[in-house]
Amino acid sequence: MRRFVLNNIGLAAITREQYIERHVTDFANRLYNPTPENRMAIFYIDGTYTYCFKSKNFRSLRQTYCRHKSDHLVKPALVVAPDGYILDIQGPYFSDAHNNDAAMISHELENDENLNNWFRPGDIVVVDRGYRDVIPALEELGLICKMPPLLKAGEQQLTTEDANEARLVTKTRWIVESRNGHLKTIFKLLNQVQQIHVLPHIGDFIRIGGAIINRYRQTIEMEDADEEMAEEMLECSTTENAVQARVEAEGLLQRDAQRWVRLSAEQVIDFPELNIEYLKRLTAGVFQIKLAPSYIQDTLQRNNEQEIQVEMLRDANRIPELGFLRIYKKYSQKDDYLKNKYNFSYTFNTDGCQAADNSKVSVWPIYILIHELPDFLRKKFTLLVGLWVAKEEPDMNIFLEPFVKQANMLSNDGFTWRLDDKIITSKLFPLGCCVDSVARCAMLNMKRFNGFYGCTYCEHPAVNVSGVRKYPMIDNVPELRTNEKVKEQMIAAASTKDDVLGVWGPSSLMNLNHFDLVQGMVVDFLHACLVGVTELYTEIIMTNTKQEFYVGSPAKTFIIDQRLLSFKPPTCIAKTQKSISEHSNWKASEWLIWLLYYSLPCLEGLYPKEYSNHLALFVRAMNILLEDSITPEMLKTSSELLIKFVYYFGQYFDNEYMHYNVHLLLPLTKSVKNWGPLWAINFVSKPVLEFCTELNSQRLKKRVRLEIVYY
């Protein structure tokens, strides 16, 4: 290791001539060298910080305390080339008042003979303003110093010339800061707070990291940075500031200056004419769309701007996933509903969990999610509005009755709140419900999906396959359920002892104003698509040993694992995928990553091509329905893909595998049309799991002030 470090970093690892030839870029040479035909060494110097814990030794405690950062740290300094090559790492030094950046480099110049011998008069050093006190010493050695100019006494801003000079320096000085960052992001140890006993060795650790970066990491290249760009920058830096010249010549900085003069169109011949195409490019370009989310976030975070906040929450153009949704649009066009900027809508959800490990007590919270909040706030502020605690699962009609009563009160009468000196009345409308299939059937008082006519979206009769109800494609397309028809069936079933096309009787939700019993039910993406169809498909091809699509043999499993574990996903994919042999323990997030990114390449060539093409239908459809923005053409494409996938699912794997989750893929596109991308409204498990995690905490007992329903 010692030989490796000495060969890859330090003044002895490279000669001055090699350094100039390999690491001084044409761009930097032309930008900073007054005689570019005679190439000189160019290097950047900058300090960085390595934080440490407090020492019990008072002297060490004092020497490591930095008043600038108000923390304990030591400071190494990097000497870096224009292409990111780390020439040397100096220090580290203590961070007390005796060791600022200038003092550190002065110490090196006085005590490091190699440093003085390596550099030559005419070499160029680029530093920040922290090195201003050492500039005379560097210039005495014949070095040309490039540093952003300082404000002169009495000035409040840099002159045009000084500002241009500062831009020339900062154009490339970021390279040394980037290398400082690489050391801490690549070598996590260097980004941690260090124990005091580690500090004597921290300089060695940093030099080892620098040597590894020099040897194995690519150099830093600035896009389009060449001699031509450098010449253009130098030319622009000397161009006269016409605006400044006019302001000074006409005395426009004076209080009594005549700033505005009325001009006619004839006097300003070259004044731009704003036509519709120019305005479209100016106001509806891609940049404005990309800027919108950060603009919303910035505005929402300001203080004392409640009026603007409410305006922005209600502006569907600023929250694209709401603007074109069928159900939301229906209510947003009516004055008494969501066209009123102070009214809001929500989706509600419930799911069960155990009160504690090994407990028989079942807990069912009700959460609501406000649609008008931006996405970065929407799922953060889910609201707990109801709770069921008992040893049995809830009777949904009893559980939901108080929720329906209060929801109707909020949608009819609303609630009042104060905005500055104005009293506002806001109404809340329950437009959607996102729950898993078991809860959905119970809430609608319908048969479960494992019974005849168990689908809540259509009147598919279900087929008995080996004693189990399945949902294969049938010749007569099942009639879709509607809100009005389901309510009629509920009333009809109340007077009989049997169900009416799967409806057992009235549901409390039929009394929930503004809620559609069919279209208001959002298809649960997590349970239907991820731990539903994706897991089912994988289980089929991993366990059917006598079928041509079988990939669960040890040899094929080994190949899948090799491919799976060899992927190097980007940082946006947080989880590292587990082995395919552990797929029974995968979580929903792992099934999502497997489906979208890994399944097709991992299974390629391991089973007949038609099965790979079949899976690709599902993968492509899910990619479309998870997009940020979905067009009608994309919806049509995804619908066609899912219909083909469901049809061939029965053809390839037989009807015994036509589970209800496979059938749910058919209304999925319509659900997206009603409610937006799959990620926008689906929030089934996360709030419930978080609730169960803190169920027994004292904090929760103090926080929850709700009506608890026992049955």
Image: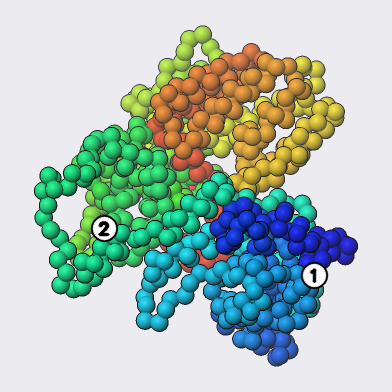
Residue 503 is drawn in which quadrant? top left
Q: Position of residue 219 (x, y in %)?
A: 68, 52
Which of the numbered marks, if any, corresponds to residue 307? 2
The local crowd at label 1, few if under 14, some if 14 to 19, many if 20 or more residues have their Cα within 10 Å, is some
Q: Which quarter of the image is occupied by the N terminus?
A: bottom right
Q: Position of residue 486 (x, y in %)?
A: 38, 26
Q: In this view, does 116 lie to the left or right of 482?
A: right
Residue 365 sits above or below residue 595 on the image: below
- Seen from the viewer's position, the closer of residues 553 and 252 is 252
User: Is there any visible trace of residue 469 in the rendered image?
Assistant: no
- Of all residues, the one furthest to the top in this rendering is 475
**Residue drawn 39% across the image and 58% down it:** 239
Q: Could you tell me which secondary element the residue under label 2 belongs to?
A: helix
Amino acid tagged 1: Asp
Amino acid tagged 2: Glu
Question: Which sits earlier in the primary sequence, circle 2 or circle 1?
Answer: 1
- Seen from the viewer's position, the closer of residues 384 and 388 is 384
- Seen from the viewer's position, the closer of residues 355 and 676 is 676
**Residue drawn 52% across the image and 50% down it:** 229
Q: Could you tell me which secondary element the residue under label 1 belongs to?
A: helix
- The residues bearing labels 2 and 1 have C-alpha atoms spaced at a distance of 57 Å
**Residue drawn 37% across the image and 45% down it:** 288
**What colouring method underlies this structural image?**
rainbow
| Residue underneath mark 1 | 204
Q: Position of residue 85 (x, y in %)?
A: 71, 58
